[in-house]
Image: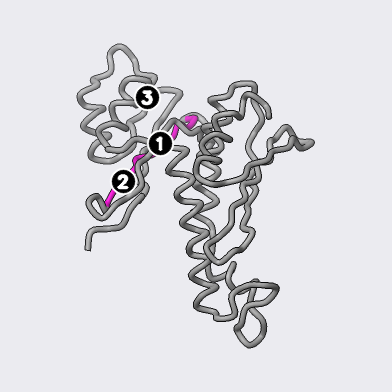
Amino acid sequence: MNERFEKIYEIAEREGWTVSHEFNSIMEVEFTFSKKSPAGQDFSFTIDVEDDDEEDYVFAELRVAVYRYWEDLDVSEETYIWLNSQGHGVNGAPWDMKDLYEDMEACETMIHDLWLALEGIEKPTEEKPKQYVYEVFQSDAWHTTYNIAHRGCYLTLEDAVDAIITNGYFDEEEDLDYVRKHLLEYRQTPDTGDINYEISAIEVGEWDK
């Protein structure tokens, strides 16, 4: 195993996933995560991240990629793949459509739990059913293309704002109290020169009923 990816393997295997990786021809690393679903499916997914000598960079990019994969997963579409024309499971999949759909939902949850583990976020419980993570992005303010780089995830909006204030590129004359107020109200920065930041809220647990 490549030592740069040791942390990725350690966390994923702790969550019950089998991990493998290979390098492709366009300077990317392809990570494949595999795990048995509750119904016995050999579920797996593959994501590509930019290869880099910096371990932390690859780890950060992987966390984003896993989240995006989970966010884009269509449970209904994945279920349909395993159904025959009468709506029953094929190739060893559960016979009843309901059972198959619920297994795909479980796979979706497995990916989400992997992302939580990679982020170091505690899984939602009945006692703490609602959690939000605030994701901070950095963009190049001088270009029309929106080139974003992951800056990190924070459990509260205040933590995300503190990270921007601490690590942001601000002029010495900048009124940081105003910047903080602006961030808390609008979740985006005023013009700070070459760099802008944006904060988006990610739902981790369940909404309060």
Gap in angstroms between the C-alphas marked 1 and 3: 30 Å
For disc 3, the marked residue is 192
- Residue type of the residue flagged with mark 1: Gly
Q: Percent x, y for residue 23?
A: 74, 35
Secondary element under disc 2, as helix, strand or loop, is strand
Are the residues flagged by discs 1 and 3 in contact, CB closer than 8 Å?
Answer: no
Q: Quadrant of the N terminus?
A: top right
Q: Percent x, y for residue 125?
A: 29, 52
For disc 2, the marked residue is 132
For the view shown, which residue lies furthest in the bottom direction? 86
Q: Percent x, y for residue 171?
A: 34, 15
- Residue type of the residue flagged with mark 3: Thr
- Which residue is pictured at 59% across the width and 52% down the height? 35
| Main secondary structure of the magenta stretch | strand
Picture quadrant of residue 209:
bottom left
- Residue type of the residue flagged with mark 2: Tyr
For the view shown, which residue lies furthest in the top direction? 172
- Which residue is pictured at 21% across the width and 32% down the height? 181
Colour basis: one colour
For the view shown, which residue lies furthest in the right direction? 25
Query: Which residue occupies the foreground of this view, 70 or 83?
Result: 83
Secondary element under disc 3, as helix, strand or loop, is loop
Question: Going by the image, does 137 lie left or right of 88?
Answer: left
For disc 1, the marked residue is 120
